[in-house]
Image (cartoon, rainbow, N blue to C red):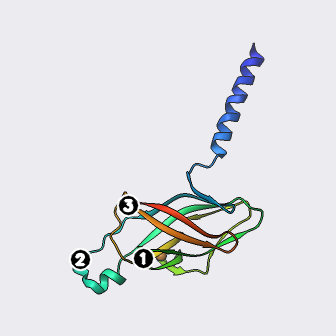
Amino acid sequence: MKMKKFFSLFVMILVLLLAACAPAGEVAVSQNGIEIIDPWVRAAAIKEDMGEEMAGGGAVTGAFMQIRNTTDRADVLLSASSEVAAEVQIHETSMQGGVMSMAEVSGVEIPAAGMAELKPGGYHIMLIGLTQELKAGDTVTLVLTFENAGEITVQVPVSMP
Ligand SMILES: [Cu+2]
């Protein structure tokens, strides 16, 4: 009786542990061994009083996601593109002398059987020169180019931070 109770407690803990290890996010795309998990783009307005020049070149936003590499060799996110932005760059945010700044990087490595996280304050995909307003509930098509996995197209929901 006592032993059975102990065993059921053990099973319960095991189930809890396994649940904790499972990926929390939702896989949006799985292709060539790469999984794109929980992608989102930050909503962004294009102010009309910016004028035509600013509306084309001034509005920016960021795209964020987790990238899982299920293969046994490292891959690199090299670039991205989207029809809603004139230019798309991969950026890394860092603190320099107490000031937050960001710079373009040549790529983000996703380790073999590992993950990379693109999140506010870290690596992110920068959409520069938005061609349209991005409202929560919209969907943006993003094409990601990986060194090994090639091009992966992902539909990214727009949301407020
Ligand atoms: Cu940036």
Distance, label 2 to label 3, CA atoms, is: 19 Å
Neighbor class of circle 2 (other Cα within 10 Å; few <14, some 14-19, many 20+) is few
Task: Tell me the SS state at disc 2.
Answer: helix
Q: Residue furthest bottom?
A: 53
Rendered image quadrant of residue 46: bottom left
**Quarter of the image with the N terminus in it:** top right
Which amino acid type is marked by label 2?
Answer: Glu
Q: Position of residue 55 (x, y in %)?
A: 31, 80
Task: Tell me the SS state at disc 1.
Answer: strand
Rendered image quadrant of residue 69: bottom right
* Residue at mark 3: 138
* Residue at mark 2: 48
Q: Position of residue 8 (x, y in %)?
A: 71, 23
Relative side of 46 to 42, left or right: left
Distance, label 2 to label 1, CA atoms, is: 17 Å
Distance, label 1 to label 3, CA atoms, is: 14 Å
Find residue 85 and name its label: 1
User: Which-is-in-front pick, marks 2 and 3?
Assistant: 3
Task: Tell me the SS state at disc 3.
Answer: loop
